[in-house]
Amino acid sequence: MTTPALLRLREHFPKAHIALLTPEKLSDLWLNHPAIDDVISIPSTANIFSIGRSLRRGRYDLALVLPNSPRSAMEPWLAGIPRRIGYSRPWRNFFLTKTVAPRFGEVKMHKRSVAEIHRLVSETPDSRSQTQDPRPKTPSSAHQIYDYLHLAGILGASAEPLPPRLAVEPAEVTRTRKQFLKDHRGLVFGLNPGAEYGPAKRWPVERFIATVNEVQERSDAAWVLFGGKNDATIATQIEAAVFATWERHKKGPHPMIFNLAGQTSLRELMALLKSCRVLLTNDTGPMHVAAALGVPVVVPFGSTSPELTGPISSGAMHHQIFKADVPCAPCFLRECPIDFRCMNGIRVDRVAEAVLRAAC
């Protein structure tokens, strides 16, 4: 979600040397990105002093601090970077040379309490209409990309939105596809059933299985199952269930599934996502990566808000978002304290239709 701001910076400062400071585990995400000249990779063991020393060696003129944490402002201060710009937040303004007030239109995530959730779901529609709407409409300008674009605008760059963008070379896609998908040359759909944040962001695995089964009856596409090592069990469950369903009913072509959960590097994940015609996914990292690679995504949203952090549609590419009409969502909790109605209310047939529609 930072990439629109980075692209606007490059547009405004075409000859500047732009370096991106990022955790080591994400550094490969930025290879060949057109807005960046250099990637400064932070090992997980690094402290603010070692990071400050690394930054000092770059002799940078200016630091644009995108995160809102105190630490992210301290690191360029320790590096002695003369201009340090970021949002005004408690415990960090001392370390910035220019603090930026929250932009007009900013909407903060409100994590609901369990008591608030019980109150909202117990209200009748009539009683709810007589009180303040617990689900005020969130404007599109509230999306998090605008927070980063606003900071770029402080430096004179355009703050107009662009679609997020990551880069994968065609040769990289061809090589990775041959390595993992062998001789398969046909249509590929992706499925990403996990979400690290917690179970409240995960559409029930039984619904993923039912969706794949429904799509399978009407398409001969191969499925690639994505995920980290922690998602391997779910991916294996989905794979086994799809094959078992086909053996019982033998409707549609025989399923072809490549279960790659826990088996890919970040670059391999990117190349394989780029190979997909569509990705069915929870609200999670691969969703954003796929969208930034130009792959349409189909996403059931539950505890989180697509208006704030969802994928950005652009041009002819439209992502398809599903939300249940429930008063307690978004709650931004990791686990549902009631009956998971936000996810259980999303219908399989509608999601399956969206996958097939995106593949056309």
Image: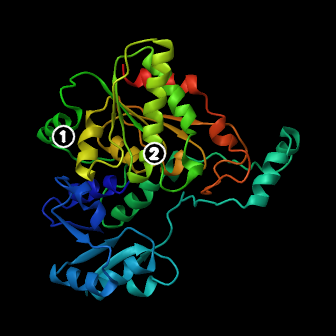
Residue 132, image x, y percentages: 79, 51
Quadrant where the image shows the C terminus: top left
SS under mark 1: helix
**Relative to 61, does residue 25 appear above or below in the rendering?**
above
**Relative to 72, does residue 213 appear above or below in the rendering?**
above
Q: Residue at x 32, y 73 (%)?
A: 44
Q: Amino acid at mark 2?
A: Thr
Q: Residue at x 24, y 69 (%)?
A: 41
Q: Is residue 217 visible?
A: yes
Q: Is residue 251 left or right of residue 262?
A: right
SS under mark 2: helix
Q: Is residue 305 visible?
A: no
Residue 131, image x, y percentages: 83, 50
Q: Which residue is mark 1?
A: 176
Q: Residue at x 43, y 39 (%)?
A: 236
Q: Which residue is mark 2?
A: 233
Q: Is residue 97 left or right of residue 172?
A: right
Residue 310, image x, y percentages: 48, 46
Circle 2: is it few (<14), some (14-19), or many (20+) Cα within 10 Å?
few
